[in-house]
Image (cartoon, helix red, strand yellow):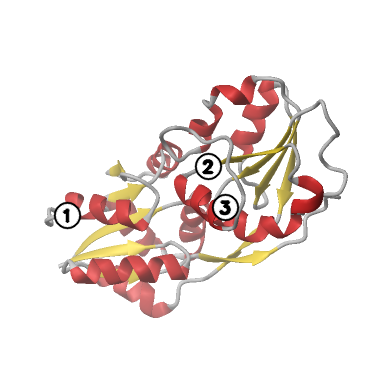
Amino acid sequence: MTHVLVTRPNEASQQLADQLHAHGLIPIVMPLYTFAAREPAIDFKSVWPEKPLRKLAVFTSPRAVEFGLPFISPQDQLHGLEIAVVGSATRAMLEASGYPVHLQAPSGFTSEDLLKVPGLAEEPGTAVIFCAPAGRDTIAKGLEDFGWRTIKAMVYERVPLKPDPRQVDYLRNAADLVSIWTSISALKLARQYLPRDAWGKILESPALVISSRIQHHLKQLGANVVDLADGPGNAELLQSILRLTGHKAAG
C-alpha cells in the first residue's frame, strides 16, 4: 500500500487525508508548523501615501488575508486602494469578505506569476505586502524593480511543530512512500527535526511540490524524483497524487 506524507498545516492536512483514504491510500499526517498572529511594526494610518501615487495591498495567501484584513479600515483606507493577490484561493477569501480584487495573474499561483501582470509596472507607488517573516522576497524585489516602494506587513508567523515518535515510525515503516511539499519552510523543518534515516527515506522516494522553487530546493537537498503538482489546493494535490501513484483519478 502506498503511504502519502502530508506536511501541510493540520486542518488542510486532515482534509486531504480523508480524501486519500477514500482512494485506498494511507496518509501520514505530519504538520510541521502552525500559524499565529503577529503584530506588524507598521502604522497603517500613514503607510500609504495620498494621491496621486498608487496604493497597493498585496495578499500572498489565504493566511495573509486571515491575519491581515483586520489592519485595513474600509472607511479610511479602501478609497483608492488596489488589491493584488497570489492565487485563486486568496482572491476567493477576500471577495467573500467583501473586498474587491484588482490584480491577479490570469494563470498560475506563484509570486512570479503575479509579477507578470502588466499593470504592476505602470505608475508605481507604495505597496504593502501582507506576509510572514522571511517570506515573499521575490514579490518585494520584483515590485522594487518596477519602482514600487515596498513594505512588508508581517502579520503572522509560522510556529514549528516537532513530529512525534508515532509519526516518525509510520514514516520509517512505509513500504511505498510519496511526500507532498507546499513550502520550503516545511522542508527545512523536516530536515532539522527528522532522524537521518527518516529524512533519507523522503529523499529516496517520489515527491510532489507546488512550485518550481520548491522543486529546485528539494532537488538541491538530494531528492531523486520531484514532480510538480497541478496546483496548490487539496483538489489539485489529490489528482496529482492519484496520477503519480497510478490510481484512478476522478473524472
Image location (x, y in percent) of residue 232: 40, 49
In terms of sequence position, does the residue under pointer 1 or pointer 2 come before the other? 2
Indicate whether 19 appears above or below 141: below
Q: Nearer the viewer, residue 100 or 150?
A: 100
Image location (x, y in percent) of residue 162: 51, 71
Q: Which mark is residue 86?
A: 2
Image location (x, y in percent) of residue 26: 23, 70
> What's under tag 1, amino acid-wise?
Thr
Disc 1 + disc 2, Cβ < 8 Å? no
Q: Please give the name of the residue rendered at 59% of the width and 34% of the height, measured from the top-left corner.
A: 138
Q: Secondary structure at mark 3?
A: helix
How far, Cα to Cα, is label 3 from label 1?
Answer: 35 Å
Indicate whether 235 appears above or below 78: below
Crowding at dot 2, Cα within 10 Å, few <14 / some 14-19 / many 20+, comes out as many
Q: Please give the name of the residue rendered at 36% of the width and 46% of the height, measured from the top-left corner.
A: 231
In terms of sequence position, does the residue under pointer 3 or pointer 2 come before the other? 2
- Name the residue carrying label 1: 245
Q: Which mark is residue 94?
A: 3
